[in-house]
Image (cartoon, grey):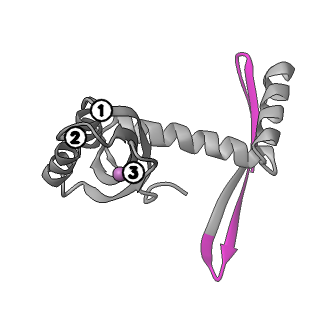
Amino acid sequence: MDVTTFDGDFTYSVTSSTLYAKGEIVADLVRTGLSLERELLDRFDESIARRAYQNRSEAVRDLIREHLVSEEGDKNKVIAATLTMVYDHHRPNLSDRLTEIQHQAHTQVLAATHVHLDHHNCLEVVIMKGRSAELRKIADRILSLRGVKHGKFVITTTGKDLK
Ligand code: NI
């Protein structure tokens, strides 16, 4: 099926094809083209080449997935997430407080990995699964502790609703 649509400045065409294996749909592919400024496309191509993408399609698919995952985070869906942090090993009570927060959130905290970076600094990665608002709250509680020097909360999908 081929469809060409004109929508103001935006023009795109769509071709669909469905791949079957043993009678089951393995990939329902739609081929689409879009018009955009040459400079924008050139910069995109340079960027994806630096990031070792083999082709534009996979790069665009990743952008779409990124958008959908970020939306899952906004809609308080069940997500997976990691909190990576570096903290001061010598800060009094800090490791106890970190453990306490993770115990209180034991239904969401799946695992934690601790590395002693040097004599003064620890790196810890906490892996979580749960409603995005709850996970963000746990991350905020940890990141706001004194002695946590830097941290990053990264959300991802559980993979269930994403091809
Ligand atoms: Ni340590």
SS assignment at label 3: strand
Foreground disc of the pair 3, 1: 1
The kind of residue tagged 3 is: Val
**Residue 158 falls in which quadrant of the image?**
bottom left
Marks 1/2: CA distance?
7 Å
- Residue holding disc 2: 94
On the image, numbered disc 1 is attached to which residue? 147
Q: CA distance from mark 3 to mark 1?
A: 16 Å
Q: Which percent across, then down, holds residue 57? A: 75, 46
Residue 59 x/y as whole percent: 71, 44
Left or right of 29: which side holds 90? left
The magenta stretch spans residue 138? no
The amino acid type found where label 2 is placed reads Leu
Residue found at x 38% / y 31%: 149
Residue 5 colored in magenta in the image? yes
Tell me the magenta residue range. Answer: 1-25
In the rendering, which numbered label is found on residue 125? 3
Residue 80 appears in the picture as rendered = no
Q: Who is closer to the viewer here, 99 or 160?
A: 99
Q: Residues within 10 Å of mark 1 (few under 14, many from 20)?
A: some
> Nearer the observer, disc 3 or disc 2?
2
Q: Position of residue 49 (x, y in %)?
A: 82, 41
Q: CA distance from mark 3 to mark 2?
A: 15 Å
Q: Return the disc, 3 or 2, that comes first in the chain's sequence.
A: 2
Residue 153, picture quadrant: top left
Label 3 Cα neighbours within 10 Å, binned few <14 / some 14-19 / many ≥20:
some
Task: Indicate which disc, 3 or 1, sits on the residue closer to the N terminus.
Answer: 3
